[in-house]
Amino acid sequence: MDDGELVRACLARSPGAWDELIERFGPVVYDAAGYTLRRVLGSTQREDAENVVQGVLLGLCEKDFHRLRSFQGRSSLRTWLISVTTRFALNYVRTEKRKGSLRLLRLEESGDELTERESPNPLPLDERERVARAMESMPDRDRLLLKLCYFDGLSYRTIAGILKMPMNSVSPLLSRAKETLRKALEIRSEAPPVSKQ
Amino acid sequence: MRDSCPDSELLAASVESRLTADEEWKVLNHASVCDDCRRELAITRLRSDAVPDPLPDGLRFRLRASGTRRRTRSFRPARVSPAASLAAVLVLSLAAILVVLFYRDDERPFSASSVSIPAIRRLPVLEIPREEERLTRQPAERERDPRRFSRSEEERKRTKPRSEFADELPDPPLPRETRTETAARVFTELTLTDVGGELALHRGQERQPIRGIVTVREGDVLVAEKPSSFHIEGRHAVVLPRDARISVASSAGEQATWLSVRAGHVLVQPDASAASRWILSDGRHVLVVEKTRARFAASREEASLTFAALSDEVSVAPEGGRADTVRAGEEWTPRGVARCARAATYQGQWASGRPRERSAFFAACDAEDLRRGRWTLLEGTLERERSSPFVRAVEKRQRLAATLRLDHRVLWDLDYLVRFRCRTNAKSVRIEIPVPQNQGTLLGELEVVRDATNRWITIELPLRRFQIVGAGRILLSSYDRMESLEFSASPKETHGGRGHLEIDDIQILER
């Protein structure tokens, strides 16, 4: 049974279709949930990962399979479920943080939870704001490249895959983006402060 | 997430490169300003090829049960008017009176008169289907999941009869049974490094002695003519005693190393830095070894595969069957787990035969190796002579140069040595390793004697013998990374003819 047939069988409430979906894609969703939580929080509680998995998979069949019906087959079901799970997990972290039930969360405080964890001497807040403002003025592709590399810590291969470019091009483009950022920061530091009148 | 964020399907399609250029541009532009979408894109990309672990049993059954409950239609009381309610009450009361009267009539002792005039025909009794009938109703489902229906006679007797609605609930977990069929796999090539001893590669009718680096694929047979050893992809150490015959390949879909024992036994020490998965086979049976860091032995005994754990506890399972735990010094056979009588022999063979050097970096200089992204060719061209590929240096600024960037970055260690094969007619070959943090370069230079020109020779050069150029002093620490290697020669200073330089099988070795 291919993905499309499985989705149609679930929507038609065929016996065994839901179980098949759980067997086939449950592990994928569990993996994506665990990975996202680990990436954002640094570690994962098993209960949190299970909450996300239940939220995603049961969300599919809520309201007469409204969510599953929205799947149009533009991507494979597997990749779509990974994407849905990642989004759900990020929202889950945000909601649980609001409730105060997650302790290690830094999703909102820093634009970059990974860099902050790894760096022993993080930049002062005003410096970070200056860098963030300078990045806003950069071209979209350069900004995305810098964020994928330094904020998300992705390998050149993964970055090349996301940006649909040869892997050999990542390094020179990254150097160029850093140069652009450096110039933007220099311009900002040279610019006179705006007087309040 | 904001309303302007693209939906998950669009991001998933972007990961799979299924969008039009315009849509792709919009998605990436949005990802450059939206942290959540960027993370979603990155994580989806990273996990799209991952091989996930199975769901925990408890969670799986909860999900199956919850999904089933949600699919059953819930009963909702309809809104009714007071008049209709009154009418319904009256009808129900009348029906109740009639039933009571009829019940009394039925309770009377049997007589001919009572049988001849039945006032109300009794309703047929709803039969609860027996287990066997329930199973025969769903042949398609039974075919699809035979394990679910393959219950023993004893189990059927123990099972209580259930209502029609019991079909909606998931069956309780059954003990797993061993399947005999094995999964079809797609194998890809992998590279063996640090090959030592006397090992021959049998490919079709050809036999070829091997050393150093070699790329093997499914169907190739490695025969140890004397005790031999090697690393798989520079990581997992393998020892073969004399006369052992194995095949090895990579099962890409499962991110596992596939190892088929054709004769004798094999000793393996997986890389301690990362847990690895192994698929062992003897040609008929398949054994899956889950994420092990323990040293183990696989052998083909009495036409069946056996597995011995040598350094730690390991979980093994015949494909599709139940997993067993094998402790250090124990051996798994299809009959069960027992003490390994040959553990001491295995340990002795390991101690005497293990590889004495390890490649911190290697490049077999073939296209497959390049495709895997272990290194990038910055200068030079990848060429092929018969079936053997190599890197040819190109002329640039009056130098012949071939430069490789190491994508698998190597941390410095001055005890390393650089080994490579080279063919040239130049009088000397130079190796340069930039040290970006110190703005200097390590430089090694070797003279090539006339007898060694125009044929493949192996060169080894310890890093301690390199000179320092461009900096007064180079301090190296484990934070510094070796990022590239440049091989060069002068095209004018040759032993005769136009200068050329070819490089193959590059290794940075640790001894």
Image (tube, coloured by chain):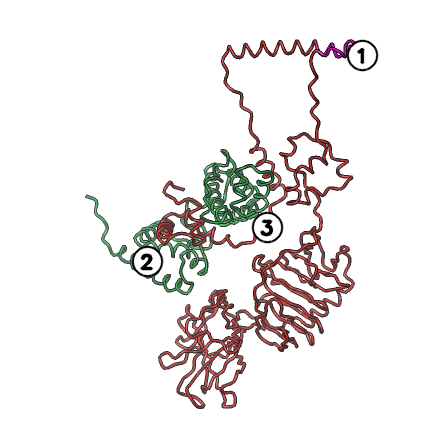
Q: What residue type is disc 3 on? A: Asp
Q: Residue at x 41, y 58 (%)?
A: A164
Q: Chain of mark 2?
A: A
Residue B51 position within the rendered picture, expressed as x and y whole percent measured from the top left: 56, 53
Q: Chain of mark 3?
A: B
Residue labelled with disc 1: B110
A97 part of magenta stretch: no
Q: Residue at x 69, y 61 (%)?
A: B311
Between circles 3 and 2, the one closer to the viewer is: 3
Between circles 1 and 3, the one closer to the viewer is: 1
Within-10-Å neighbours for mark 3: few <14, some 14–19, many 20+: few
Comes first in the chain, label 1 or label 3 = 3
Q: What residue type is disc 2 on? A: Leu
Q: Is residue B353 left or right of residue B53?
A: right
Tag 3 and tag 2 share a subunit: no
Mark 1 vs 3: CB contact within 8 A:
no
Label 2, label 1: how many angstroms apart (C-alpha)? 102 Å
Residue B45 position within the rendered picture, expressed as x and y whole percent measured from the top left: 47, 53
Within-10-Å neighbours for mark 2: few <14, some 14–19, many 20+: many
Residue labelled with disc 3: B53
Q: Specify the chain shown as green.
A: A
Secondary structure at numbered mark 3: loop
Q: Chain of mark 1?
A: B
In-front residue for pair B297/A65:
A65
Give the numbered dot on residue B84.
none
Q: Residue at x 65, y 44 (%)?
A: B145
Label 3, label 2: how many angstroms apart (C-alpha)? 41 Å
Residue labelled with disc 2: A181
In-front residue for pair A108/B121:
B121
Q: Specify the chain shown as red.
A: B
Q: Which residues are magenta?
A: B102-118
Per the picture, the main secondary structure of the magenta-coloured stretch is helix
